[in-house]
Amino acid sequence: MLKSGFGGGGDASSPLKLFTNAKKKINGIYRDIGNYVSEFHTFVEEIKDVEENELVHQELVDHIQTCAQKVNGIKEMLLRDHMKVVFFGRTSNGKSTVINAMLWDKILPSGLGHTTNCFLSIEGCDDKDGPYLLCDGSEEKRNVKSVSQLGHALSQESMSNDSLIKVCWPKNKCSLLKNEVVLVDSPGIDVTEDMDSWIDAYCLDADVFILVANAESTLMLAEKKFFHKVNERLSKPNIFILNNRWDASAAEPDLMEQVRQQHLERGISFLAKELGVVTPQQAKDRVFFISAKEALNARLQRLQDDIISGMPEAGGALAEGFQARLIEFCTFEHSFEECISRSATRTKFHQHTQCAQDIMKSLLTECESLLKESSRMKQECDEYNEQLENQITFLEKRLKLLTAQAKEAITRLVSETEFQVRQAMSDEIRRLSLLVDEFDQPFHQNMMVLQVYKAELYRHVEEVLGRNLSARCSSSLQKQINKSKQLMLDEAQPLFECSNNSEQEPVLVSQAQNSAFDMSYDINCASLCQDFQEDIEFKFSLGFKCLMGRFIGSRKAIAPSEVPRPISGTGEVIAHQRQQADDSLSLQDILTSVAASYLKHNNSQSAGMLVGIIMVPYALWRTIGWKAIVFTVASYGSLYLYERLTWTSRAQEHALKRQFVEHATEKLNLITTFTSSNCSHQVQQELSTTFAQICHKVDEISKELKSDSEEMQDKSSRLSEIQSKIKTLKNKANFLSGDIDSFVKKFLHDYAV
Ligand code: GDP
């Protein structure tokens, strides 16, 4: 049960609440900062993993980790933070009694036989755990149920005067303990010379020092010396002087005021002048005249009887001035609570808030620089993407234009090629007889020799014809093709420049330039003249067969249009068609032709000769008789003999060549169109290949640009997300900084001394 009134510190308006509220608040702030720092850390780790290394550097990650470690360290320190008051004074001045009175309980044994010979700290613990003892550094909890047990335990311990025993008392039993005040009782200041070690061990983190003096004597040198040493080590320590046992003065009321004044002046002088920790005015409020014994008894009685006015122990009579001393004790408690709460709040939390502010300030700066850097990167990214999109549009438009131009150039060159090749072939066909005459190989009527002769003749014609055509067309066409290719490449040049890979275009140029175009005319003479059949048998020009052949020849000549248009390399087809045409001439046709020729008396040489052969001897027979007939027969025989004798190998060769020229001319005329279109097709193929290569490269560049653009868009949207996250972090940092500022205003500035 918590006590109220008389400075019990249990109510909500207790000055101690300043510290506990501040601690609660700063704990909350550090919890929020801890969460914030870990959120920040996760965020930067994520960005770092998603390849934005240029945005997040290792230094930033390290800095955030350092902040996280600091925050965790301070959070742990905050859990341990409490208000600490240390009591000093000579042995039996009543330090333990003062502590008991302040705690409204006889926690520490006092009086004869219970002189404290080591440091004792009393701090709160959970109700279910306490009370228990912890002896100097040991974690072993020693069970203590009552003061007598504690006294017994303490007396059993043989402790050195600078060792510490922790008394852990249930918080709910004492409001001071509940409000995180730790009270430390020391051995009498007169028992040691080694004050330095005491100060180092127990005083450096103390918020308030209470010197418990004996009002019946003056301040001793040992006491003063100790506080001088404390003052050297700590900056302006908070010191209260309690002149205890003031109840003894009640026995001498005449001297009481004089003695009080003397003690007060000495106390003020000690605090203000000797130590200089407060002003003389402030020092007045640090010196009290109390009776701890009376206060403790009154409180114990009150707890027992629930009586407001104090009663002396065991029903003894009220000493003179008891009420005033009790009130002064309460006044001391109130001043002490205000002082320790303010001091502890300032010393314990000022540094923490400073640290929190520094952390938040540095993280805010990081947020701002991240925001700035991400904005710059996003802008760069968007600008680059715009550039890429413009390049893609340019590429598409330019490629359309290039395609139209290339199409036109190819069509023009194809027509040109077709014309040139046709022209050249016509010329060469006209000159075919000269070309055949140039052929000079041994000729013989023998079948085998004849076959070889013909094969060589075909090869010769094919070779020379090809060479001549090439000489006439190839070089000029080559020039035009190269020019067209170069034009295409020149037009495509700006498109290649859009690529990030500058090696692409030179490779293509060198490929285009190195590929020398070699046109194939595809004149296969052997195949073309496969159906060529020479006729080098002797034939008498006035013989029956010959004369008939002439009639038939003229008959055959009337249907040249029946021969279909041949296709290159299809000599077999041509021969077959010719054979069909031959077969289709029946005997009836031949006779009809002879009769028709004869009856029509046409002017042909054959008809005249026939008439001559039949009619002239008859006429001569009739007019001049048998002599004329003999003459005619002799003439005929002489002519035959002449022709038979002049039918030499040379004449045969000549006849073959003439027949071949006729045959080849006809065949070559048939394939002229095909050859020229074949050549133009080759040119078209050549140029189309180059154009296709250009298109392929442009397509690659376009793909590359599109992929880059997509990448930039992704990066830009990622950066937008990052920016919005950074903005959130920045707002949170501002909010937390505001929280820290309001904490400083509320708990540190307003109460700063
Ligand atoms: P410590 O050694 O400084 O801790 O002193 P204690 O608290 O043990 O007190 C020593 C003795 O002084 C005890 O017998 C107390 O009862 C007594 N004592 C303490 N305070 C007062 C007081 O205000 N008036 C009187 N008359 N005796 C007191």
Image (spheres, rainbow, N blue to C red):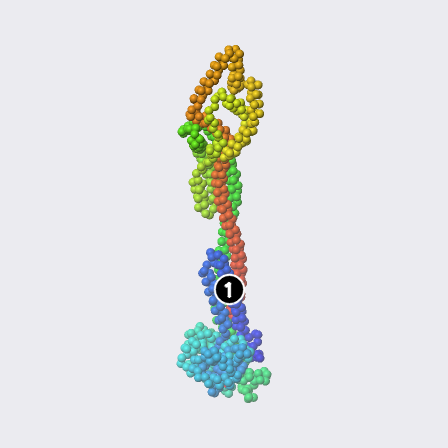
Q: Residues within 10 Å of mark 1 (few under 14, many from 20)?
A: some
Task: Give coordinates of residue 714: x percent, y percent.
Answer: 52, 53
Task: Give coordinates of residue 397: x percent, y percent.
Answer: 53, 42
Secondary structure under the numbered disc 1 in the rendered image: helix
In this orientation, does residue 210 appear?
Answer: no
Q: Quadrant of residue 434?
A: top left
Task: Give coordinates of residue 540: x percent, y percent.
Answer: 47, 22
Q: Who's the residue at 48% across and 37% down the image?
A: 682
* Direction top: furthest residue: 623
Task: Give coordinates of residue 556: x percent, y percent.
Answer: 54, 26
Residue at numbered disc 1: 38
User: Which of the pair 651/363 is nearer the observer?
Assistant: 651
In this orientation, does residue 41 appear?
Answer: yes
Q: Who's the residue at 43% across and 40% down the image?
A: 514
User: Which of the pair 676/363 is nearer the observer?
Assistant: 676
User: Which of the pair 276/115 is nearer the observer?
Assistant: 115
Quadrant for the N terminus in the image:
bottom right
Q: Who's the residue at 44% across and 37% down the image?
A: 518
Q: Who's the residue at 46% across and 29% down the image?
A: 428
Q: Quadrant of residue 5?
A: bottom right
